[in-house]
Amino acid sequence: MAEAPAKGALPESVKLLIGAGGIYAAFLYYGSLQEDVFRYAAADGSTFTQAWFLQVLEALANVVIGFVGMQITGPTKGIPLKMFAISGAAQVTAKACTSLALANGLSFPVATLAKSGKMAPVMAGSLLLGGASYDLREYLQVAAIIGGTAIVSMGKKKGSGSSSTMGVVYILMSLVFDGVTAGFQKRLKTETAKVGVKPKPYDFMFWTNFFMFLTAAVIAGGLGEVQTGMAFCIANPEILNKIIKFALCSAVGQSFIFYVVSNFDPLVLSTVTTTRKIFSVLLSIFLKGHSLSVVGWSGIAMSCGGIISELQTKSSGHSQKKKGSEHKN
């Protein structure tokens, strides 16, 4: 028999509506703004290419929100910061590479679908370094996402623009760093368990983004992007407005992610974020003027099928674990 919610507590359905609604609203707008930033052209024809400067501002917004949340929930002491530093550096590099892919001509739908195939480098790293094994279905899921993305890239109608070689290179680099990030995040969990520390959600948000901010600031400063990025924004207030909204959406979206994590199973978050990616792709196609041929739409269907199949695999695995724990009890 299910337990009744505590007096004054919100029903689970309302909590889910708040969490999922917040993630959808924040990150659908986030994706739209990111695309707008890199498609923006100034009066002289120049475009915004300062991806590392963008990451400085995004990480800074997350640091501020993370710090406030950490003070409210109480900071955790004794956290091993070395792993946070490495993980944060890898994560911000992956995000910067995605932005660089967009800045170099890769379309937003293709970039988003490609990022959904991040399981590929994770699987490769686990096979080569961790001795992991995967079943045929998992290989097919990754193949469907990657194959569908390639078909979408090739299936654009004439005149709709093509993805540049550098754009493809950058999105592949982003996937590699996604794999590196996943590996270090696993080590982070191991390290925190060793010292008997369990960081809270806002600890993760603050410290990860703190090191993301430091990494991005050093690289942006070294490349001169802070000066050129600020100059471009001052000369084009319209894009500065979009960048500020973009950074705020990231921070608000992260907060809603942690809200869902703290109230529901990881599968619920996986379901919300996975379907959000699909909706982001479709919204971009319909609202941003991307023109696809029948071949391109078949690629969309193929990639989405792989994404949904991956979600279904996680769901069935979660159900089996739940049944196993019930039998033990």
Image (cartoon, rainbow, N blue to C red):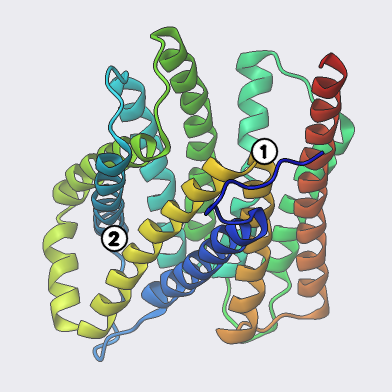
Q: Is residue 86 at all visible to an observer of this figure?
A: yes
Residue 318 shown left or right of residue 249 in the figure? right
| Identity of the residue drawn at 72% across and 80% down | 292
| Identity of the residue drawn at 32% across and 76% down | 242
How far apart are labels 1 and 2 at the CA level?
Answer: 27 Å
Q: Quadrant of the C terminus?
A: top right
Residue 87 shown left or right of residue 7 in the figure? left
Q: Position of residue 16 (x, y in %)?
A: 62, 57
Q: Residues within 10 Å of mark 2 (few under 14, many from 20)?
A: many
Query: Residue 156's quadrant in the figure?
Result: bottom right
Residue 234 shown left or right of residue 176 in the figure? left
* Amino acid at pointer 2: Leu
| Identity of the residue drawn at 65% across and 18% down | 128
Q: Position of residue 161 (x, y in %)?
A: 57, 79
Report the residue marked by disc 2. 54
Nearest the viewer among 65 and 232 is: 65
Report the residue marked by disc 1. 120
User: In the rendered structure, which disc, 1 or 2, sits on the residue that comes first in sequence?
Assistant: 2
Q: Is mark 1 on a helix, strand or loop?
A: helix
